Image (cartoon, rainbow, N blue to C red):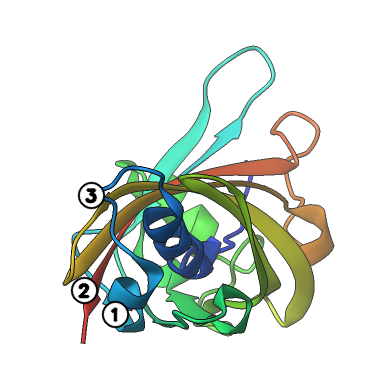
Amino acid sequence: MIKQQSKATPTALALGVVLATTFGPSATSASAPQLSDAAGSYGITGASRVHFSVAQVGGGGIIGDFGKFSGNFRIDGNNIARSSVEFTLYPESVETGESRVEDFLKSSAVFDSATYRTVTFRSTSVKQTGPDTAAVEGTLTARGKARKERFSVKLMDWNSRSISFIIRGSIFRSPYGMDVGTPIYSNVVEFDMNIKGQKH
């Protein structure tokens, strides 16, 4: 079997919001929103989707989602680099459609959700890479181990009250002590998240 690691998210995941807002303001269209419009504090909503997959030799693999997560981010309209994001993922909420696989992922062989109830991600830097894209780096902590991880962010929708963006990232499982099943199962967990934020 294999395990997945978050990232967090995570994935990493919350820091993408900060980057996303920089894109809206930087757009060249006359009707594009300005950074100052997007400035403020936001909360990640339950309408978001945190999806992951782990490939398997010969095809197949493990795919699933996390049903429970939370996060907040603050956008500094004057200096995006000073914006901040925090994201928390709850491994106990992993969903794959197969109870056997879910129980394995929650076990001590992978997430050990009974001991480590959360996976967290806190941004340390945000860098715009295009009109509607950015790269976010931060510290991902899982099973008591912390590492720097990087995610790509693409702005999908934005208005004065809400934000929607896609965050993608590839996380190695082994550094977090979750490499069971390799090499039959890939050591890499792919995250493909649709994150939605609501302004406070």
What kind of residue is marked 3?
Ser
Q: For the residue carrying disc 1, how many other residues have a C-alpha within 10 Å: few (<14), some (14-19), or many (20+)?
A: many
Question: What percent of the width, then of the height, locates residue 85?
Answer: 50, 79
Residue drawn at (71%, 34%) of the image: 186
Can residue 111 be seen here?
yes
Between 49 and 79, which is closer to the camera in this rendering? 79
Residue mark closest to the camera, 3 vs 2: 3
Q: For the residue carrying disc 3, how many other residues have a C-alpha within 10 Å: few (<14), some (14-19), or many (20+)?
A: few
The residues bearing labels 3 and 2 have C-alpha atoms spaced at a distance of 21 Å
What kind of residue is marked 1?
Gly
Earlier in the chain: of badge 3 and badge 2, it is 3
The residues bearing labels 2 and 1 have C-alpha atoms spaced at a distance of 5 Å
The extreme front residue here reads 30
Picture layout, residue 105 above or below residue 184:
below
The residue under label 2 is: 198
Task: Give the side of residue 182 with respect to residue 56, left or right.
Answer: right
Earlier in the chain: of badge 2 and badge 1, it is 1
The residues bearing labels 1 and 3 have C-alpha atoms spaced at a distance of 25 Å
Can residue 9 be seen here?
no
Question: What percent of the width, then of the height, locates residue 45?
Answer: 23, 70
Residue drawn at (29%, 41%) of the image: 97
Residue drawn at (45%, 72%) of the image: 89
The residue under label 1 is: 43
Between 81 and 89, which is closer to the camera in this rendering? 81
What kind of residue is marked 2?
Gln
The residue under label 3 is: 31
Picture layout, residue 185 above or below residue 28:
above
Task: Give the side of residue 2 with respect to residue 35, left or right.
Answer: right
Q: Secondary structure at mark 1?
A: strand
Decide: marks 2, 1 in contact (CB < 8 A)?
Answer: yes
Q: For the residue carrying disc 2, how many other residues have a C-alpha within 10 Å: few (<14), some (14-19), or many (20+)?
A: some
